[in-house]
Image (cartoon, grey):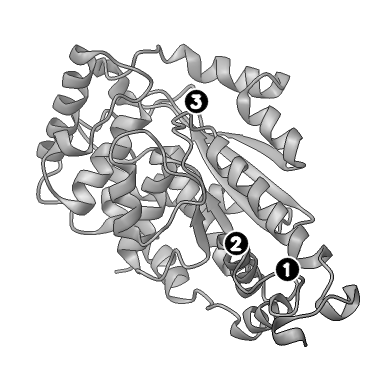
Amino acid sequence: MSGPFDDIRNLVRSMPGADAEAAAMVAARDAVLTKPAGALGRLEGLVSWMAAWQGKAPPSFDRPLVCVFAGSHGVTRKGVSAFPDAVNRQMLDNFAAGGAAINQLCAAYGLGFKVFDLALDMPTGDITEGPALDERACVATMAFGMEAVAAGTDCLGIGEMGIGNTTVAASLYAALFGGEASHWVGHGTGVDGAGLARKVAAVEAALACHAGHLTDPLDILRRLGGREIAAMAGAILAARLQHVPVVIDGYVSTAAAAVLHALDPSALDHCVAGHLSAEGVHAEVLERLGLTPVLSLGMRLGEGSGAAMAMGVIKGALACHTGMATFAQAGVSGRDGA
């Protein structure tokens, strides 16, 4: 008998690949621009990546969009955060008023910005006592996340906001990758030593509660995840299906990517990691997923801030690729005087 998760698995199986011809066209132009070969380093690779996944050369950066998904978590009752649940709604109001860091970054780099309220007033189930979501609700939330790209974008940044979600992300990593709970837990919003101990205890309790049911990545997501993480997974998948490159934010956003990677290791080929977060063991997670961060700035804010910063770099990379003169156009001698 088929279930809701089968629809997601079918979408994963239908993911399109990269356009090698578009990437080759970028490389051909790059070879005749007024600079030494490889002189712009990773910037050159980012343009090639954009072209390969948009399927055109040059790629475009006309409708970049950062989406922040906000959810609330029942596990916060275990004292795992330095901030109360009321901050969820207060921060959404702050986003709407333009007062958050992500508002400033999107304005600075000319990025669109959308916030998705994922039933903030209805926390998910406490993962230490039972599943966060049932299968149908998890798939419905992933489908909601897929709508993030419905209006059209040519580069998607994903971020999140949700008190308690670093505990949820740590639980997901522990279930997906194994090892001691304490290895995956960080200080999150700035909990003290006692708070950190409560986080570790919560992750341990969650793993024990769901023991025997942590082999299927989608079941791991619905048992230990949250609405914002399910929605981000849906957005990443939808972007792949619509040939949209994705920039992933930090520690929590990467947990959504990790679920898809567990389903299919090629599921993140259209993604880059926006930055290396200072939270937890983000560096190890990125290495496991084969993602090299664009930036490493010691950030751990969430709310899409690292993704937005990286999208600014991508914008600059594309401007160089499309705006620079070739050697012939500028009358500049190439290698060996040619």
Please state which amino acid type lies under the numbered disc 2.
Answer: Pro
Residue highlighted by disc 3: 120
Please state which amino acid type lies under the numbered disc 1.
Answer: Pro
Residue highlighted by disc 2: 245
Q: Which mark is residue 59?
A: 1
Tags 2 and 1 touching, CB below 8 Å: yes
Secondary structure at numbered mark 2: loop
Q: Residue at x 28, y 49 (%)?
A: 284
Mark 3 or mark 1, which is nearer to you? Answer: 1
* Quadrant location of the C terminus in the rendered image: bottom right
Secondary structure at numbered mark 3: loop
Find residue 314 and report its image quarter. Answer: bottom right
| Most foreground residue, 120 or 56 | 56
The image shows residue 72 at horizontal and vertical percentages of 42, 26
Distance of mark 2 from mark 1, alpha carbons?
10 Å
- Whether residue 141 appears in this view of the structure is no
